[in-house]
Amino acid sequence: MIRPNGLDAFFMPRGIAVIGASGKKGSMGHQVMYHLTQMGFSGGIFPINPGSGEILGLRCYKDINDVESPVDLVVLLLKAELCVAAAGSIARRRKEKGDAGAVVVGAAGFAELATEEGVQRQLALTNMLKEAGVRVIGPNCVGVVDLYNGVNTTFTAPPGTLKGGISIVSQSGAFATAYLRWGKELGLLGVSKFISVGNMADVTIAEMLEYLGQDDSTRSIFIYLEGVADARGLIETAARVTQKKPIVAIKSGRTAMGSKVAQSHTSSIAGDHLLYAGTFEQAGIIQAESVAELFHATRAFDKLPLPKGNRVCVVTVVGGPSIICVDKMYDRGSAQMATLPEPLKEELRKHLSSSATIGKPEGFIDMTASVTDEMHYEVLSLLMKCDDIDGIIFLTTPPGYSDEKSMSDAIIRAYNSVPEHKKKPLLPVLISGSAVNTSRKLLEAAGLPTFEYPDDAAAVMSDMVKYAEYRRRLDREALSDREGM
Amino acid sequence: MIRPNGLDAFFMPRGIAVIGASGKKGSMGHQVMYHLTQMGFSGGIFPINPGSGEILGLRCYKDINDVESPVDLVVLLLKAELCVAAAGSIARRRKEKGDAGAVVVGAAGFAELATEEGVQRQLALTNMLKEAGVRVIGPNCVGVVDLYNGVNTTFTAPPGTLKGGISIVSQSGAFATAYLRWGKELGLLGVSKFISVGNMADVTIAEMLEYLGQDDSTRSIFIYLEGVADARGLIETAARVTQKKPIVAIKSGRTAMGSKVAQSHTSSIAGDHLLYAGTFEQAGIIQAESVAELFHATRAFDKLPLPKGNRVCVVTVVGGPSIICVDKMYDRGSAQMATLPEPLKEELRKHLSSSATIGKPEGFIDMTASVTDEMHYEVLSLLMKCDDIDGIIFLTTPPGYSDEKSMSDAIIRAYNSVPEHKKKPLLPVLISGSAVNTSRKLLEAAGLPTFEYPDDAAAVMSDMVKYAEYRRRLDREALSDREGM
């Protein structure tokens, strides 16, 4: 069950010990315990604190070596100065009992200080653990979350995130946590694993990617990257993973000043931006140009099938935003407007009002404001069925006089009017923000990622087309290699 | 009272007649009446429909000439084919009674069809009205809204938008309406006037800008532009307006394909993108690169004072997002990191934890997660008071264990700790989206525009710095002109 690199112990531990657990509300040690006990974790949870008898109803232990049940994952919440001694206890347990194979170290005060003391402390900590065969995530991180296995070692990620196919690997714990929380109210995203890697004293982003590449519940990977020592190794690993699933990355520290800030954050050397951008592209990694794109592309890849080609239909109830959408799509270059077959146009004309624009220019349909729910269904299901269209962007502002629920139902029925293998990405843009949250929640729950802005949807459709083309190129190359043998 | 160009009649009419008003729920003629009667309009509202006795409790007239009270604004909701005849009635009233000086024509089916019939119909309509001295907005538009005077001729913009200093001029009614609705739930924006210009058969964007330039309740102007016949005239007018107040514009139809879509939308010739971009810059117009930037910059200009220089402090609780923020700011080039004076740094050190980063690099402060509400107040008020800082971007994800209300209060107190003339833009970035709506609502209500993404805030701060520099340059030139006299 445990794979060679030992990372399974972080995500499917039999038991979890929390060194530095606390009964004091508002403290980090209490917050972690609180989150962990709310996740439905089926194994044992063991607070370790010599001064407490019980925390949140759980028996407290003086030392990790006192716990008799199996403990695979240890959360180390002590201050930096106390961590090395605690690592000694963990290493002893590992040697004596054979478990305790994974440690998350939260504290700051290590190599990120860029002081001799900090660097030495980090070395002492990790050498002791590594020698005992213990894998370490951190230090200076918020830890890991696994929605499928009820693991949560963070004080920042509250329970309640939906299960899904997104896994997050981040050099910023706060940024990754923000993404989890961003999605919650509207059900925007579902998560598999969350890893705040911190200083990467042992477990690196590359190793984590390799692991997620093999993880069945991960369909889409989000990376926040400041800089790594072994950029080449990271890219090589990523290139293996993108053969199977998409990676969307944002690279910070792109500018000289941003790079200086990154250095003060994780003492990362941000490295040459253009170098990263070029190698990302070669490795099939989608580099997001904005945080919005990172957030949306990751979840669109999780929720939707890849487009089978680059032919996109833009169908709209609202004129202006659709132009902005098409502009953005053509700025990006990967997607093209689909050519609508004549029989499809004729069929569309039957359902739309006489003021509608169909196929002028090619691939563009303006239903105009004279729409009904049924028209939404008829038009979108015709587009879903058409083999000459690989993706659909649908733009509307649910009008004041229409019912959000019945319009959303029509869109969902249309999306589901074709069998699974015929499905194509459908990106609904609801341009009135939180005023149309009812529609947004319904569409998201039905597996359709919604957008507030037309240009965000265009960027994401372009990303999907680009990645799908990358995958098809790999398939063609693999085929011609086999034929050449 | 009525200014020479006659546009006052659209926004401060004594009475409003609605030709095509309807008692049938769900119809456009009913929706317009419903919105109009919900706005607290103090003048008379006169539904015109030969077939009805009363609509929403208001007496219905067979013809506009039957209304004895003053009618300054006429909303024409009939189908295109019926509009010319109705224009005849309006022109007659204008000649006989001297009022009815402004008409909004909603219907499509005119020049935007790019057919001989459509073009001729538009000419017939507007010639008849122009000859009678009646100003026309439209056709093919959703009309006008004035939040201060209770005017709303649209079927799309529901009542309830907050009053504020933003005025919107748009070649897309749907896009403009979406902006109104986008803001409502969280109180993101306050509006003065909304003008959907449609085909601009008479009133142009340029005229509207000139008018808004003189409008005391307009502090910030939003333009959605596809293309205009007289681009030079528009830019010249805009350049006069930006001497007094900011204009933020988005130009659609920038790409060849986008331009084709624009043509099918309003038969606009989108024109050369780079030409527009260059002239925009010369005229001091802020050209938004995304819809998000358009939406946010417009409201930041309304809510906040202009920065007095280009020195920005980025203060954060969250490492990663602040790097993305700084990257974006330096991509844009107009803002720079402020140099923090030594006494300020010393003062900051007293209030922050030892793990905090202060002024590495210059202008950057990482408070780290070890923060209290009081620390927020102390740090932000020190930065507000410092004359070497012209603007502040503050980034956080209100942590799970802190109280959204008390943290927001601390930020608001800090912003208000200096007198009005010492205020500077403070942009709070709350990176957990709708999960922190409580904070967002509080900050917005206190006049601080909040952001979800760090890069959006950086773009907006750059826009504010750029526009403020433009204004200072104009002032210097005016001064040297005077000195040269």
Image (spheres, coloured by chain):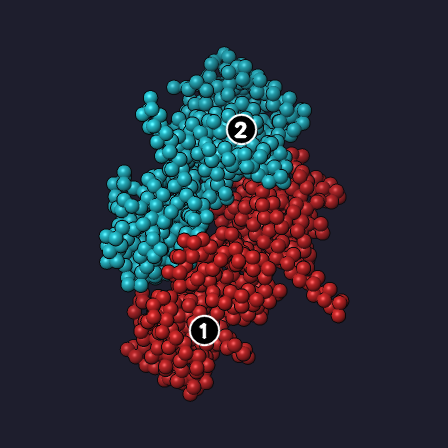
Chain colours: A red, B cyan
Q: In which quarter of the image is the N terminus of chain B?
A: top left
- Residue at (62, 64) in percent of width and height: A243
Residue B227, horizontal then vertical, whole percent:
56, 32
Residue identifier under label 1? A202
Q: Quadrant of the C terminus of chain B?
A: top left
Q: Is residue B379 above or below residue B97?
A: below
Residue identifier under label 2? B231
Residue A205, horizontal then vertical, whole percent:
49, 67
Distance (Cα) linking label 2 and label 1: 61 Å
Residue B210, horizontal then vertical, whole percent:
44, 26
Q: Residue furthest top?
A: B96
Element marked by disc 1: loop
Q: Quadrant of residue B107?
A: top right
Q: In the drawing, does residue A91 fall left or right of residue A365?
A: left
Q: Is residue B294 above or below residue A127?
A: above
Q: Quadrant of residue B172?
A: top right
Which amino acid, by three-letter code, is at mark 2? Ala
Which amino acid, by three-letter code, is at mark 1? Asp
Element marked by disc 2: helix
**Residue A32 visible from this viewpoint:** no
Q: Mark 2 lies on which chain?
A: B
Q: Quadrant of residue B150?
A: top left
